[in-house]
Image: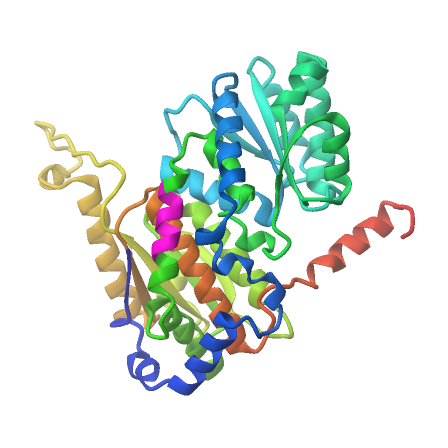
Amino acid sequence: MISINFSNSKIENDIKNFSKEKMKEIHDVIENKTGLGNEFLGWLTWPEDFNKDEYQKMKEVANKLRQEIDVLLVVGIGGSYLGARAADEMIRGLYPNDKVELIYIGNTISSTYTKQVLDYIADKEFAIANISKSGTTTEPGIAFRVFEKHLIDKKGKEVAKNRIVAVTDKARGALKQLADAEGYQTFTIPDDIGGRFSVFTPVGIFPLLVAGIDTDAMFRGAQKALNDLKSLDNQAYQYAVARYIFHEQKGYKAETLVSYELQMQMFTEWWKQLFGESEGKDGKGLFPTSVVFSTDLHSLGQFIQEGTKNVLFETVIDVKNPTVDLNIPSTEEDLDGLNYLTTKTFHEINATALVGVIDAHSNTGNVPNIILEFDKMDAEMFGYAGYWFMKACAFSGYLLGVNPFNQPGVEVYKENMFKLLKKPGY
């Protein structure tokens, strides 16, 4: 479901000649769970061995909520919301016609955004999915306080009890204690799966069920990727090797993930957390950036074409089949001179732009390009792509010599903020 093309990468021979012994060593470290952070490799087999009883219960709770609400507020930050949002927008698009809208809160401390969401849902029926391992993270914690109070004030405690779901630790933590005390339904974040690898757990699956997304198809895609990537000879590993060669051997500092579909923008945000948080440590790692073309060709395209060289390379997602397509109407006057395009669809023009840009950036601009061909943008494709990138990320992190599953640097800003806010103990 993903096909990789290195013909514009300028490192085809380097990839072919990369040490098979080194690749086998890293592959064995992953499969045997013997590397740094191996206690967080639960995602590796999750698409096959996830808790089927809990999955069924999530379906029941989600179906009941779908009959009652207009909006599900997804409370979370980082891996607690990015995976769900990436899947939701990739699969449903930016303006879905499903009756339930997902709105993401707790991923910012912006007063304006939070108050505008509060005003927006004033006349809507809503529920809350609070997603946090601990329940003490500042951003989602204070957002949940606001919206929990609003729901209780609006509907009463009994209704609120049935419209608040906590996705959290199975036994401990502030959110688990609160949920148990108030009688909120809980689903479990597995101990051996970190946030940025958690999209196929209740962290991602429960909100997507409420959105009406075919999560069975997501699991089918993830299961297919799991099986496709069990052998040493797979394209996710080749992608990881290419990234290593660019960074460690060629001196590149950044990778830009390129999409030509606006509904893929949050997928690229999820990808940025996946690789940035997994590899950006010990003074190492490519800086993950993203653009959406052709939109950003009219801004960042100038820099990519003619700016500083040997800094970034592009990885381009080429979606072969759009979710929907449409034609360009003709006009009798043809004042804008665009009638010549009326024999083409929007997607055909978009696909042509992709080919032209790769030629311009790679051959004229001397910016290496890797192309990843996606069949489509549906639930099965998201499942496949999500697992594919997670496996590539683990391999890439181990090649780099870092622990792909921790994030010690994230705590620095938190401690500084707590001191400034005079949190007890700081």
The residue nearer to you, when weighing 181 against 12, is 181
Q: Is residue 77 magenta?
A: no
Instruction: Identify the residue at image location x=60%, y=61%.
Output: 40
Instruction: Identify the residue at image location x=38%, y=69%.
Output: 239
**Residue 421 found in image quarter:** top right
Q: Position of residue 83 (x, y in %)?
A: 50, 46
**Residue 185 found in image quarter:** top right
The residue nearer to you, when weighing 102 against 23, is 23
The residue nearer to you, when weighing 78 against 362, is 78
**Residue 415 found in image quarter:** bottom right
Q: Position of residue 153 (x, y in %)?
A: 72, 14
- Which secondary structure dominates the residues rendered in magenta? helix
The answer to whether residue 288 is above or below residue 125 is below
What's the image's color scheme? Answer: rainbow
Instruction: Identify the residue at image location x=49%, y=54%.
Output: 46
Image quadrant in which the N terminus is located: bottom left
Q: Give the extent of the magenta segment.
A: 217-224
Instruction: Identify the residue at image location x=35%, y=48%.
Output: 220
Please state if 167 lies on the left or on the right of 347 as rendered. right
The answer to whether residue 229 is above or below residue 60 is below
